[in-house]
Each structure stands twice: as structure tokens, then as C-alpha cells.
Amino acid sequence: MIAAAASIGVYGNDWPVWRGPNQNGVSEESGWKPKNAEVSWTKELGDGYSAVSVKGDRLYTMGHKPVDEKQGEDVVYCLNAKTGGEIWSYAYPASTGEYKGPRATPVLDGDRLYTVSQDGQVICFDATAGNVIWQMNVLTETGNKNIKWGISSSAVFVGDLILLNVGDSGTALKKSDGSIVWKSEGTASYASPVVFDHKGRKLAAVFSAPGLQVVDALTGEKIASVEWKTSYDINGADPLVIGEKIFISSGYKKGCAMFDFSSGSLEKVWENDLMRNQFSSSVYFDGQLYGVDGQVKSKGALRCISAADGSEKWNETVGFASLMAADGKLIILNEEGTLLFVEISPDGYRELSRIETGLSKLCWTAPVLANGMIYCRNDKGTLVAVDVSK
């Protein structure tokens, strides 16, 4: 879906789901102008790490308002994407947690919006009016225990189903009513599932506590798996499906690996410790992987490595950060609130421009470009819209 943005020459794209329409952190939006970036508006949401989803002139996100140390309420927002004005909001009781607020991002499918709380509450809304269509608790219904820092998996769509990283190889719900279609038991982790096609089947790569699991997305049948254990069972960065290959990366001194799935089994192509994505997912572009190697509150390095063999092309210290890509450029938000624009190239780091968003740390949520605006937030829930359309 391509629509003309407000400024002539800018071609915008909606961003209706976590990691974008292709689930890879890459937008097809073009003509936006990083050197003219300026803050357009801000909005206070409440604590949390939810990113935004955008469709047309509407933006959807979440925040949390604590009542005490353990309990509070999550708030789902529908805002005007160009002005930040509130169209509707909905609040419901939710655990506050050690790190306050929701981790997952609301996602759109047609005229419905789906949200996930850190304690397993899944809600389907009428996206236009904000009315609740159905709700359920996926932990209660599957019998699984919550993970240490709360559910972070956004809902992922495949056919008539919603997939979540719940259980050691995922769980699927019906979009229509939230009933469970298939489930798994065991320890999940923090990444969202990634759906892909393989030999006429819809499969899903689920990065759970034991490691990478490949399952039939429609039935839950386990196809292949590889062990990938980390400290605290944290596999937080989404897998990247690149043709017949699957890339995974984890922090806590673990590293990254590429697997060939062409035969239907996971055969390791290479593994190293050059890219250690704690939870900030990498992007792939023209044979190279770009991502942030490092832990939160540390000297994270933006790194470019070859997808073919894992060799390093270059690295640059930017601090811990999250990123996406569009129009041959990386859009990087570091945890201090600096928004950087970097040319995508294997030849070296070339910064095009940067802007101070005014956000205080900690900024751990991935930035989103949609229809000429870049949306950034911090953990306290300040959402900033940066206009790059002019």
C-alpha cells in the first residue's frame, strides 16, 4: 500500500504491525529527508516499551500507569498520526512489573487491533471506535508460566490465526474469538515469531528459551529446532528469514549464527560473536546484516557483517540502540535519545545527519518511519514524532 504523503516527492508507507509489513524492520518508504528532520509533536503515554503501528492518519500504541508497586493499568491509545491528538483510549488492569509497562506493540489486521500485555492479556479491538471485541489471558488458557520480565511478543498474523511466543514453540489463537488453536508448553522468550513460506507451507520461526524452533504455523507441528541457550533465557531479537536461511542473534556474550533451512532441517552455515543483539533486532540489506552489538547501558557498536560468512565489514560506536531501514538508510535511536541517519553501505560508516529528540534515557524501543514521520519513545512513555517529509 503506497500513498502520497503531505509533501510532494515523499512516498509513504503504513506500518501496521511490529517490524513492518514484511516483518523485517525494512520499509519501502522513499523520498523522506533526514537532513530536514524536526520534532513535530510529543505525547505522554505512561511507562512502557511498546512501539507504534500506523495506518493512514491513525497511530496505535500503549502505555502503563502504576497504581502501586505491583498493579496499575495499561492504556491502549489511538492517536492522530500527524498531530498526536487522542482519538480514543482504553484502560484495563495490568501488572506493573519490574520494568513498568507493556513490551508488545499493538498490531492491525483490517479494522481490528490486537494488543498483548506483559502478563498475558490479549485483547481484540474495533480499531475505529476502540470497542473491545474479545479478550482472553493466554497464560491462563495455555497453562504456561510467565517469563521473568513479562511477555514481549507482539501478535503475528498468519491466515485466520494470531501467533505468540508463549510456550517453548509458540501458541496460536483464532483472530475471530481468541480461542486456542494450538499451543506448546515450556519456557518462551522475548522475540516475536516470524512467519515465512517454505515449499508450500506456512512456517514460523519461534526464538524461545531453548533456542530456535521452526513450526508449522497453522498446526503447531514441530519441524526443526536448534539449541541456543543464553543467560536468563533471553532470546529477545526476532529471527531474520533471508531466502532459505535463518539468522539469529542474542546478547549476554552469546553471539549470532546463520542456518540453512533449504532441506527442512537447520544446518549451521556460520556462527560468531560479532553481532550480539540483546533485544534490538538486526536488518538485512543487499547481502549484509546491520545491527547493534552490545548490552543496554553500554558502549554498543553499530556493526555491518556479511550474511554469507559472518565476516565484519565495519563497526562504529553509537551506544546501545535500536534501528530500522528505509530508502538506503538506517534509522537509529540510541538509548540516550539521539536519532541518527546512516547510509546503508558495506564500505564503511557514513552518518548523514542526526537530531536530538529531547527524549531522556532510556530509549529501548525501535523507531518507526511511517508516511513521512519517525516515531520514537522512551521507557517513561514520552512519544516524539519527528517530521522528515519536508
Image (spheres, rainbow, N blue to C red):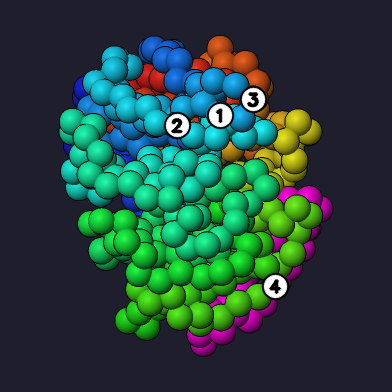
- Residue 302 at x, y percent in the picture: 67, 41
Among the 4 quarters of the image, the one containing residue 53: top left
266 in relation to 236, above or below: below
Q: Residue at x 46, y 27 (%)?
A: 73
**Which mark, residue 69?**
3
Q: Which residue is mark 1?
A: 71
Distance of mark 4 from mark 3, alpha carbons?
36 Å
Q: Are marks 1 and 2 in contact (CB under 8 Å)?
A: yes
Q: Residue at x 53, y 44 (%)?
A: 119
Name the residue type under label 1: Gln
Of label 3 and label 2, which has the lower sequence position?
Answer: 3
Which portion, as a residue range, is magenta? 251-275
SS at badge 4: strand
Q: Which residue is mark 2?
A: 93
- Distance, label 3 to label 2, CA atoms, is 13 Å
Q: Is residue 355 above or below residue 351?
A: above
Q: Name the residue: 40% across, 71% down.
A: 182
